[in-house]
Image (cartoon, grey):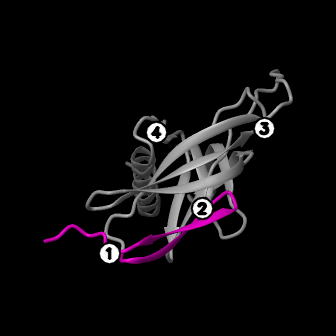
Amino acid sequence: MLKNPHLNFYFKAFRFYIFIFTAMLALVSPTLSAAPAVFTKGELVIPEGAVISGKSNAYYSDIILAMDQQGRLVISRANKNSLVSVETVEVLIMESFPLQVSLSVSGFLSVPCVALLSPAVSYTDNQFTVVLAESTLGPAETCIAVTEPFQSTIALDVANLSAGTYTVNVNGIETEFILEMDNSPLN
């Protein structure tokens, strides 16, 4: 382990957050396999991540956090991915208990040669925010300049939510759904 106790704390905290991020990706789409974050030679490499901050959300890939002279991890590199164009968001509530909620999202990729990346999902104050981005073309790749339609299903974690109205925002397209009753398993 690292000799500096502050670095130990930061390293353990980042390992915990990376574990949570990877677990959340697995819950959102069990068919996708997220590559693990790797800490080696003073750098933490995170394959994908999102910044969700109200109105200006962003998605990044190949994120590298490097240790500065004070031993803190700071962003040294990240590639920003383009967000996809979302046309429709439909909320699907499964008739089960506890309730299960998913989104059916359709829209367009910028070109047919890119892929839809894993969704980043955040929940705060009765609002789910979903950031959907597409992969990038390599520097030597070219692609026909036409949009490509996509359709994706995204599960929302609604376990233990109270009855009420919830907002969903997917790349700026908003919709609502109502939970008629508390979504907690009976004790």
| Distance of label 3 from label 1 (alpha carbons) | 40 Å
- Amino acid of disc 2: Gln
| Distance of label 4 from label 1 (alpha carbons) | 37 Å
Query: Where is residue 116 drawn, in percent x and y?
Result: 63, 38
- Amino acid of disc 1: Met
Crowding at mark 3 (Cα within 10 Å: few <14, some 14-19, many 20+): many
Q: Earlier in the sequence, mark 3 or mark 2?
A: 2
| Distance of label 1 from label 2 (alpha carbons) | 50 Å
- Amino acid of disc 4: Pro
Q: Which residue is mark 4?
A: 36
Which residue is drawn at the image coordinates 21% and 67% (left, top)? Answer: 185
Residue 135 visible to an observer of this rendering: no
User: Is 76 displayed left or right of 120 in the figure?
Assistant: right
Q: Do tag 4 and tag 1 residues touch (Cβ < 8 Å)?
A: no
Q: Earlier in the sequence, mark 1 or mark 2?
A: 2
Foreground label between 2 and 4: 4
Foreground label between 3 and 2: 3
Label annotation for residue 110: 3
- Amino acid of disc 3: Ser
45 and 7: which is toward the camera: 45
Label annotation for residue 181: 1
**What segment carries the magenta color?**
162-187
Q: Is residue 44 magenta?
A: no
Vertical comparison of 13 with 48: above or below: below
Q: Quadrant of the C terminus?
A: bottom left
Q: Which residue is mark 2?
A: 70
Q: Earlier in the sequence, mark 2 or mark 4?
A: 4
